């Protein structure tokens, strides 16, 4: 599943469509995680894309609430404050293409934009989500915790999250209600950089470890964004390019291989049904 760095990379790769008008929408396969609404196309056609925001692993395409002047006489203006909400699920991709690019296998939704371009939603496993509505009413966003890259998120905020938590610190990092956007790959890499074992109880972290954890979180996520995310499976950005951060992974997927810092063999355990990788010497 694309995590924060992949979703942020996609967001940045699509910024060129801000200001473009949605001219047509084709829903080829509506059966995603939640069926695409029957009025999905009519909610979008005629609007301008005014901005693209990321919240955790979700993308929000903010839409204009005003129709072009020549159409106002014939159609009612759209409601303001609405957005297209997109979650990529396990294997979804948003691809910016030239208008008329032939449809490929697993292309489920095509959004044609002004300027002879189109935004194609491709999803082999169909676990993604696309819906239109008022941003404040999306129940999905109500379960997204603070963004770990936000300048306003501090070590004190992280300390408040770990206080009294008996769950392993890795599970806390992956809890989308606690922190928005971190998944299994980056939780492993963050904890290695912070020198903390994934199975440590969150409440047992010291103040110094909490500060290290916040610093490691930001360093790993920012580096992953700079390298375009991790293309371990299906992930591509909006231009169809693969990421390269998988070439810089220190522990994830490296069970039995020597630690790149101390040469001790990397170990694998399981927490909450997900594989955890760590160095028994570098992480305490």
Image (spheres, rainbow, N blue to C red):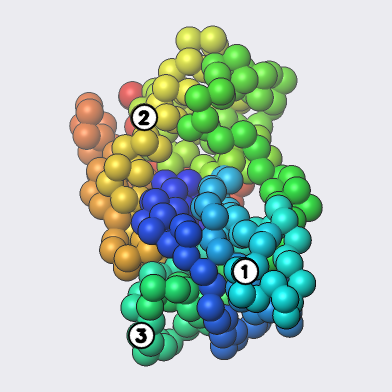
Residue 155 point in image, percent of width and height: 54, 16
Please state if 137 lies on the left or on the right of 222 as rendered. right
Q: Residues within 10 Å of mark 1 (few under 14, many from 20)?
A: few
Could you tell me how far apart the alpha carbons at marks 3 and 1 are, in whole angstroms? 30 Å
**Residues under numbered marks 2 and 1 in contact, where contact means CB atoms less than 8 Å apart:** no
Q: In this rendering, is residue 155 above or below 9?
A: above
User: Which residue is denoted by mark 3 in the rendering?
Assistant: 101
**Residues under numbered marks 3 and 1 in contact, where contact means CB atoms less than 8 Å apart:** no
Q: In this rendering, is residue 90 above or below 282?
A: below
Instruction: Decide if residue 191 is in sight here.
Output: no
The residue lying at 60 percent from left, 68 percent from top is 68
Q: Secondary structure at mark 2?
A: helix
Quarter occupied by residue 265: top left
| First in sequence: mark 3 vs mark 1 | 1
Could you tell me how far apart the alpha carbons at marks 3 and 2 are, in whole angstroms? 38 Å
Point out the image quarter for the C terminus: top left
Residue 272 point in image, percent of width and height: 61, 46
Q: In this rendering, is residue 33 above or below 279?
A: below
The residue lying at 65 percent from left, 76 percent from top is 71
**Disc number placed over residue 69 in the picture, else none:** 1
Please state if 216 lies on the left or on the right of 139 as rendered. left
The residue lying at 22 percent from left, 27 percent from top is 262
The residue lying at 56 percent from left, 35 percent from top is 147
**Disc number placed over residue 273 in the picture, else none:** none
Q: Secondary structure at mark 1?
A: helix
User: Which residue is denoted by mark 2 in the rendering?
Assistant: 219
Residue 16 point in image, percent of width and height: 38, 58
Please state if 257 lies on the left or on the right of 40 as rendered. left
| First in sequence: mark 3 vs mark 2 | 3
Q: Nearer the viewer, mark 2 or mark 1?
A: 1
């Amino acid at each position: 599943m694309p995590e924060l760095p992949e979703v942020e990379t996609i967001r940045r790769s699509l910024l060129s469509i801000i200001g473009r008008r949605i001219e047509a929408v084709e829903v080829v396969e509506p059966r995603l995680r939640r069926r695409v609404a029957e009025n999905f196309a009519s909610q979008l056609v005629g609007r301008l894309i005014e901005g693209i925001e990321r919240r955790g692993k979700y993308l929000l395409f903010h839409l204009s609430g005003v129709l072009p002047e020549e159409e106002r006489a014939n159609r009612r203006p759209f409601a303001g404050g609405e957005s297209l909400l997109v979650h990529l699920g396990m294997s979804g991709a948003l691809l910016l293409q030239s208008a008329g690019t032939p449809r490929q296998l697993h292309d489920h939704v095509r959004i044609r934009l002004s300027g002879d371009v189109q935004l194609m939603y491709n999803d082999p496993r169909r676990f993604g989500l696309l819906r239109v509505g008022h941003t404040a009413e999306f129940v999905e966003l109500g379960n997204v915790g603070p963004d770990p890259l936000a300048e306003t998120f501090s070590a004190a905020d992280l300390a408040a999250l770990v206080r009294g938590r008996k769950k392993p610190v890795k599970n806390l990092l992956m809890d989308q209600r606690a922190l928005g956007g971190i998944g299994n790959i980056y939780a492993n890499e963050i904890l290695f950089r912070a020198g903390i074992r994934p199975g440590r109880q969150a409440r047992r972290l010291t103040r110094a470890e909490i500060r290290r954890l916040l610093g490691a979180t930001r360093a790993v996520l920012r580096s992953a964004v700079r390298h375009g995310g991790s293309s371990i499976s299906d992930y591509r950005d909006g231009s169809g390019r693969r990421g390269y951060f998988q070439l810089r992974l220190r522990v994830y997927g490296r069970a039995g291989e020597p630690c790149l810092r101390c040469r001790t063999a990397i170990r694998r355990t399981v927490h909450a049904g997900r594989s955890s990788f760590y160095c028994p010497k570098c992480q305490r």
